[in-house]
Image (tube, helix red, strand yellow):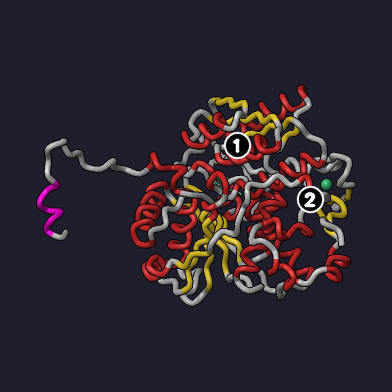
Amino acid sequence: MSFSYLSHLSCPRCDRTFSSEEGVLTCLSCGSPLFARYDAQRLRRALAREALSARPRGLWRYHELLPVRDEANIVTLGESFTPIVPLVASGRDMGLGRLFAKDEGRLPSGTFKARGATVGVSRARELGVTKLALPTNGNAGAAWALYAARAGMKATVVMPDSAPTVPRKECVAAGAHLFVTGGTIGDAGRLVGRAAERYGWYDVSTLREPYRLEGKKTMGIEIAEQFGWEVPDVIVYPTGGGAGVIGIHKGLLELRELGWIGDRLPRMVVVQSAGCAPLVRAFEEGRDASEPWPDPATIAFGMRVPKALGDFLILDVVRKTGGTAVAVTDAEILQERAGTVRREGLDVCPEGAAALAGARRLAAAGWLQGDETVLVMNTGSGLKYAEQIDGMGEPLGADDELPDMLSGGV
Ligand SMILES: *Cc1c(COP(=O)(O)O)cnc(C)c1O
Ligand SMILES: [Zn+2]
């Protein structure tokens, strides 16, 4: 038994293959992101899915399908399974009888970005990396800064100066070198690219190296296992760089190849904000790739990506699975977040709220049927965006009694 069944890297666009041990990061022929590939034939014989249940409930239980060869290189903060929470009241409100949220806010640093960081940092350590750099809208920077700190690596993070406060402070607290700049994550990415080349840093921008995606893929595998090796009818994902959509789908394809799930795959739904919806536009116009979105603006900061490097891969997943793409406004996002925490007690992040608002739209349009199993990804904790909640409580003086209206049982 090997710890990892990683066999090679391959290009999803031109099919060229590369060794996984020589530090190739993107396709040398066509520039596409590369996918890690595994020896499914051998793994199928070596491991039955039932064997997993004896292992700790976290993403490293899928180590055969992850790219780290030596267990000693794993950099972990104890990532656990994230719960799938039934949203009965919200579902009733939308006309959906089987609505669920997978709450990624429970992971270290409070977002699903921890999945990419634990796998990406571990593999980077295995490849001998000591300094890494990434552009981010905030949450990826925070996650990578924390895991880099744990690995004893130096992290350099560049984010837009409009990014939320909490992830900025997390980077600083973890000892990362944090730079903020005007412009978007795309501009930050160009700065990182140039500096990485000059200083020999490992550039871990989304889809610029193959291993971060492998962490995100575990969302798909975990969903399948939690649903008893079935898949939901629809998965709704708040999309920025799109590694989540590509990763979930990749994970499910690998399970299908292993025979661990059946042929049917969930319809993948991309939700974006109306203020930054390049993928929705490309989907609606029937294009294979997206155009950079001018002046992207949304309160759901993790989705503020004007042009995703893997846009052609995301659009392909959406079309192949019979999914769709939908944009929602910031007003809908705020209303959905407020409604969800009041109805369900689940304080979703604005991105998760966007995904729920997308589901609401699709239910109203009849695209989602009332009896379908719909899984919405809540990609992070609402706590990371506490500043977006109005209200700080009503002031009481030292000698004040609580107002009578409270004692009246209101
Ligand atoms: C990064 C991020 C997203 C977007 O995810 P992608 O996989 O990059 O499309 C959504 N929600 C949150 C909270 C994020 O941090
Ligand atoms: Zn290629």
The residue identified by callout 2 is 71
Residue 33 visible in the current orientation: no
On the image, the x and y values in percent for residue 247 come to: 68, 55
Q: Label for residue 69?
A: none
Q: CA distance from mark 1 to mark 2?
A: 25 Å
Q: Residues within 10 Å of mark 1 (few under 14, many from 20)?
A: many
Determine the residue positioned at 59% across, 34% down: 185
Q: Which amino acid, mark 1?
A: Gly
On the image, the x and y values in percent for residue 144 come to: 64, 39
Check the image and report above or below for 409 versus 291.
below
Return the residue found at the far top.
198
* Residue nearest the viewer, comparing 339 with 236: 339
In front: label 1 or label 2: 2
Q: Label for residue 141?
A: 1
* Magenta stretch in the rendered image: 402-408
Image quadrant occupied by the N terminus: bottom right
Q: Quadrant of residue 339?
A: bottom left
Q: Is residue 354 left or right of residue 191?
A: left
Q: Is residue 208 left or right of residue 164?
A: right
Decide if ligand 1 comes within 8 Å of the CB at mark 2: no
* Residue nearest the viewer, comparing 17 with 383: 383
Q: Quadrant of residue 309?
A: top right
Check the image and report above or below for 144 versus 337.
above
Q: Which amino acid, mark 2?
A: Glu
The mark that comes first in sequence, 1 or 2, is 2
